[in-house]
Every structure is written in C-alpha cells, then in structure tokens.
Image: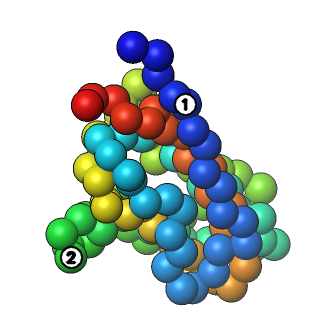
Amino acid sequence: MAQNFRRFVKNDVGTAAETVFTADSFDAVVGISLANVHTAAINVSAYITSGGNDLYLIKDAPIPVGSSLQVLDGGAKLVVENTDVLKVQSDTASSLDAYVSCVDSIST
C-alpha cells in the first residue's frame, strides 16, 4: 500500500493557540519543527487535543533568537487518530513558525 506524505505549516503564530492540522484518519506525525522568527527568545508549546483533553508534547520550551526546536527527534513518531488536533502556541505575538510532516492514513 502506497503511503501519502503530507506537510502542514503555520507561520507567525502568537499567544493564541493555532491549529496546525486535524487528523482525518490514523496518521503518523514524523516531524515537528518550531522556529523562532522573532527578535528575542520565545517560549513555545505544542500539544494534541484528543477527546477534549490537551496532551502536551512540549510546554513552555525556550527557543533562542534565530533557532528552532525539533519536537520529535531521534526517530520518534506520533500516531494520531481521526479528529485529533495538533496545536502550537508562543508566549510572544507573531513569533513562531511551525512545520509538521505526516504520513496520512497509516492503517485502514
């Protein structure tokens, strides 16, 4: 069975949580990169909302100026279910770019 790779992006994220993507099946998140695009250090969070619960992947993690944070490293992957929502947030307005790589429909 062929796999469909997808990417989702969100730029200039600020203090309100932003949805990067909503799963439409059993999907595998294979990469989450968060980049500081501001002129000062920022603190960021990434989490999955599933069944009304927020499950943090990382919370209030610092990212220095001009740097990025790989939330999934060392080959780690996340399996998300239909309607799970990946959200990101910064402590500073218009300061965060998010790039997420997924494999769509890993099982049927």
The vertical placement of 98 against 28, above or below, is below
Q: Which mark is residue 14?
A: none
The C terminus lies in which quarter of the figure?
A: top left
Q: How is the image coloured?
A: rainbow
- Secondary structure beneath label 2: loop
Q: Badge 1: how crowded within 10 Å, few (<14), some, or many (20+)? A: some
The vertical placement of 4 against 11, above or below, is above
- From the top left corner, tell me how far across and down residue 17 is, in percent: 49, 79
Residue pictured at 39% horizontal, 53% vertical:
23
In this rendered view, identify the residue nearer to me: 47 or 7. Answer: 7
Q: Badge 2: how crowded within 10 Å, few (<14), some, or many (20+)? A: few
Q: Amino acid at mark 1?
A: Phe
Residue pictured at 41% horizontal, 25% vertical:
75
Upstream in the sequence, badge 2 or badge 1? 1
* Residue on which disc 1 sits: 5
The vertical placement of 24 against 20, above or below, is above
Q: Amino acid at mark 2?
A: Gly
Note whether residue 21 is visible.
yes
- From the top left corner, tell me how far across and down residue 76 is, in percent: 36, 31
Cα separation, mark 2 vs mark 1, equals 27 Å
- From the top left corner, tell me how far across and down residue 73 is, in percent: 45, 34
Residue pictured at 26% horizontal, 71% vertical:
54
Q: Residue furthest top?
A: 1
Note whether residue 41 is visible.
no
Q: Is residue 71 left or right of residue 66?
A: left
- From the top left corner, tell me how far across and down residue 68 is, in percent: 65, 50
* Residue on which disc 2 sits: 52
The N terminus lies in which quarter of the figure?
A: top left
In this rendered view, identify the residue nearer to me: 52 or 68. Answer: 52
- Secondary structure beneath label 1: strand
Confirm or deny contact between disc 2 and disc 1 (CB under 8 A): no
Residue pictured at 55% horizontal, 31% vertical:
5
